[in-house]
């Protein structure tokens, strides 16, 4: 086959399998899922030991899995990428500014002139108590003026509440209150600006520096990861993975072998003639990989059943920034407003994503700013392969019981190899029907893998595309 036709065949085989597996999971576990399940490729596996050890620390490897960006692989199947969602979020926040519209700026200019004497008193009383306001300090405020800086400080120190200003600052309090009365509309605009910038700064600080006090999850004696909530208890995850009856299966049938191609049927639905190598390749005992055409002829048929035992649902959500900005790190309202205002410039007042690093297409359904809000994991799948009218002697010769196996399903689901232990569990030759059935399954574990290093198979999960988190 040409490269182009092989690519088309591979895509068709992958899509047939993806559609079948998604249908099975969605129908079987619909009551436990918080949205539509999608197949997601993640060969590294999910570190299911979320908490471990005598101190019950959180497993940084597990939190890193939960915090991965979701992306579309080159084969058109969703995959978990190398970037962390919290890192992308921080990068987005670094490109967000709070803009005051031209209309609101006109109000500020008009009322600042009308209330010039009151504003002068506010600045004088502030500087009498705290020293001259520097250009560096002004640059941190919107607008970058002395009054803008004072508004930001009133918001930061006292939550914008005049009654909380200490009595030792009575002269400043009186001046500030007189200014508010003289320029009420301007003051509302500037207070909103100060509050917005304070909240943006809190979101950045808590994301960049997670601690126990802001909801970070402790991963070591002095180490913390950004907070995630909603994960099942460790005992629930352990129990789920050990409940083998929580399972789904996908059945494949191959027939009419001709050279390296065959007719494929997935869960009873015909998919057409596809390249066998695009469906299933295997390596036994470290040998070079080969496909099933090695054992078949035009009259042969092969049926495969891939079963995912111990299916377990693991949701997780970023810890939302609370009203005071002290706990949490994720603020979807900032994101939603900033994305909605992109490109509007000074037409509107509010948060706005600036620059070209993050275009509008990066956000929302199908965008790169995404994550799995719910994982669907399982034990390593078992694979049953039945050869009929095939070269049974060669099958039995190649597939020795307990020999190590590495399998590649559809070009994007590797099973066995690397850190996974996968082997030929049994070979059953039935003389009455002339068939041979090979069972591939996880090898018997030698020794104990520490819980913080053990991984589960990732079938996929429920995607989230902020600021649309549905």
Image (cartoon, rainbow, N blue to C red):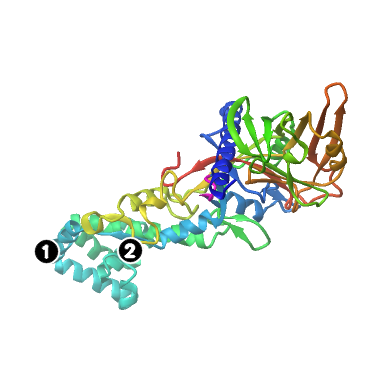
Does the magenta-highlighted stretch encompass residue 74? yes
For residue 309, what is the image quadrant? top right
| Quadrant (top left, top right, bottom left, bottom right) of the C terminus | top left
Which label number is shown at residue 114?
A: 1
- Name the residue at 49% across, 43% down: 464
Q: Position of residue 453 (x, y in %)?
A: 73, 53
Q: Which residues are magenta?
A: 71-76
Mark 1, other Cα within 10 Å: few <14 / some 14–19 / many ≥20: few
Q: Nearer the viewer, residue 387 or 237?
A: 387
Q: Nearer the viewer, residue 425 or 10?
A: 10
| Quadrant (top left, top right, bottom left, bottom right) of the N terminus | top right
Circle nearer the N terminus (2, 1) = 1
Which label number is shown at residue 152?
A: 2
- Name the residue at 87% across, 41% down: 397
Q: Position of residue 458 (x, y in %)?
A: 64, 43
Mark 2, other Cα within 10 Å: few <14 / some 14–19 / many ≥20: many
Q: Secondary structure at mark 2?
A: helix
- Give the main secondary structure of the magenta stretch: loop
Q: Position of residue 461 (x, y in %)?
A: 57, 40
Q: CA distance from mark 2 to mark 1?
A: 22 Å
**Left or right, 272 with reference to 364:** right
For residue 8, what is the image quadrant? top right
Q: Secondary structure at mark 1?
A: helix
């Amino acid at each position: 086959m040409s490269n182009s036709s092989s690519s088309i065949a591979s895509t068709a085989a992958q899509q047939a399998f993806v559609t079948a597996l998604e249908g099975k999971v969605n129908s079987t576990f619909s009551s436990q899922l918080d949205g539509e399940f999608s197949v997601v490729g993640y060969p590294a596996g999910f570190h299911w030991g979320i908490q471990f050890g005598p101190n019950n620390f959180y497993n940084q490897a597990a939190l890193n899995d939960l915090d991965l960006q979701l992306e579309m692989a080159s084969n058109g199947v969703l995959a978990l990428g190398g970037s962390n969602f919290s890192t992308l979020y921080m990068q987005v926040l670094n490109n967000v500014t709070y803009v005051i519209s031209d209309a609101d700026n006109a109000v500020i200019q008009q009322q600042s002139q009308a209330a010039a004497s009151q504003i002068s008193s506010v600045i004088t009383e502030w500087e009498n108590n705290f020293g001259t306001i520097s250009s560096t300090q002004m640059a941190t405020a919107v607008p970058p003026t002395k009054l803008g800086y004072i508004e930001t400080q009133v918001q930061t120190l006292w939550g914008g509440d005049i009654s909380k200003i200490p009595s030792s600052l009575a002269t400043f309090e009186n001046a500030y209150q007189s200014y508010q009365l003289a320029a009420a509309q301007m003051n509302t605009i500037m207070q909103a600006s100060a509050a917005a910038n304070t909240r943006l700064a809190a979101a950045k600080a808590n994301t960049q520096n997670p601690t126990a006090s802001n909801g970070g999850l402790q991963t070591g004696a002095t180490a913390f990861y950004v907070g995630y909530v909603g994960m099942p208890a460790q005992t629930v995850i352990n129990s789920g993975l050990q409940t083998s009856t929580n399972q789904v299966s996908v059945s494949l049938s191959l027939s009419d072998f001709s050279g390296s191609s065959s007719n494929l049927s997935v869960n009873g639905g015909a998919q057409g003639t596809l390249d066998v190598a695009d469906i299933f390749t295997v390596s036994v005992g470290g040998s070079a990989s080969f496909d099933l055409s090695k054992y078949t002829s035009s009259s042969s048929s092969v049926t495969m059943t891939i079963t995912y035992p111990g299916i377990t649902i693991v949701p997780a959500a970023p810890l939302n920034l609370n009203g005071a900005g002290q706990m949490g790190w994720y603020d979807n309202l900032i994101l939603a407003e900033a994305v909605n205002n992109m490109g509007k410039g000074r037409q509107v007042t509010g948060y706005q994503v600036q620059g070209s690093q993050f275009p509008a297409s990066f956000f929302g359904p199908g965008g790169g700013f995404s994550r799995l809000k719910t994982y669907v994991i399982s034990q390593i799948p078992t694979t049953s392969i039945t050869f009929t009218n095939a070269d049974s002697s060669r099958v039995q010769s190649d597939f020795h019981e307990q020999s190590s196996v590495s399998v590649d399903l559809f070009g994007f689901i590797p099973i066995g190899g690397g850190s996974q232990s996968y082997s030929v569990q049994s070979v059953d030759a039935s003389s009455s029907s002339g068939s041979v059935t090979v069972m591939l399954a996880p090898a018997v574990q030698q020794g104990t893998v520490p819980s913080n290093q053990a991984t589960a198979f990732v079938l996929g999960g429920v995607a989230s595309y902020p600021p649309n988190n549905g």
